[in-house]
Amino acid sequence: MVELSQLAETPIPELVLLFAGFMAVFIGAYGDRDDTTHWDEIIRAMAFIVGLVLIFLSIVYALDKDFNFSTLLVMGLLGFGLFMRVFRRVKWSAGIALIVGIVVFALVHNFAVANDVEWLSITAVLIITLVAMFIVYMTLHVLEAMTDFLGAIVSFRPLLLILGLLGIVEAVLIFAETSLSGLLG
């Protein structure tokens, strides 16, 4: 089995960073148009997946004891920008609140039936479920709004273009056994 610390020693993070940089430059230069094609959807899906992989690699890279701050910063921001290009349009707080509501209803109802609790009627179980759903929804909705705001900033086309160029430069410098932080001192 391969350990995650060995992943930081392979050229895979640099190759993913290079590919993500080219993808971000393409998205930043080409951008969203009014006449979307099949290729635009493929590029969005690839950007989502590459962004997830880059976020994962930046976490693995951060867990490694010997890491460059600039590499970690570029990988994290570029991955977040590519990931949020698609994910910020998804309204996930209501779905998670609904799932939590179903789980809370099942647990409270099963508890009431199993322990023969008389005051936990179906109305009380529904009220408990709705309160739990409301609390989860409001909490996640605030988090959703914050990630939407940050995602809008990081996935802004000119900024994504700059992050893509930084990603390409950082990947090339890593292949040359240095980094932006190594060059800047």
Image (cartoon, rainbow, N blue to C red):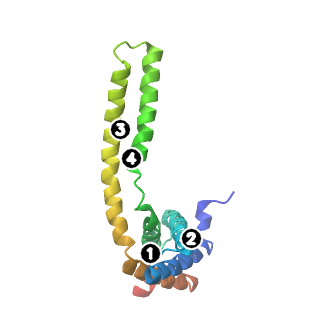
**Residue highlighted by disc 1:** 74
Q: Looking at the picture, how far across and down is residue 129, in whole percent?
A: 36, 31
Give me the disc on residue 133.
3
Type of amino acid under label 4: Ala
Distance (Cα) linking label 1 and label 3: 37 Å
Q: Secondary structure at mark 1?
A: helix
Mark 1 neighbour class, 10 Å CA radius: few under 14, some 14 to 19, many 20 or more:
many
**Residue highlighted by disc 4:** 94
50 displayed left or right of 146: right
Sequence-wise, which precedes: disc 2 or disc 4? 2
Mark 4 neighbour class, 10 Å CA radius: few under 14, some 14 to 19, many 20 or more:
some
Please state which of the two labelled residues, at mark 1 or mark 2, is closer to the viewer.
2
Sequence-wise, which precedes: disc 4 or disc 3? 4
Instruction: Spot the residue most to the front.
Output: 35
Distance (Cα) linking label 4 and label 3: 9 Å
Distance (Cα) linking label 3 and label 2: 35 Å
Q: Looking at the picture, how far across and down is residue 32, in whole percent?
A: 43, 76
Mark 2 neighbour class, 10 Å CA radius: few under 14, some 14 to 19, many 20 or more:
few
Location of residue 84 with respect to 139 vertically, above or below: below
Q: Nearer the viewer, residue 162 or 129?
A: 129
Type of amino acid under label 2: Ile
Give me the disc on residue 42.
2
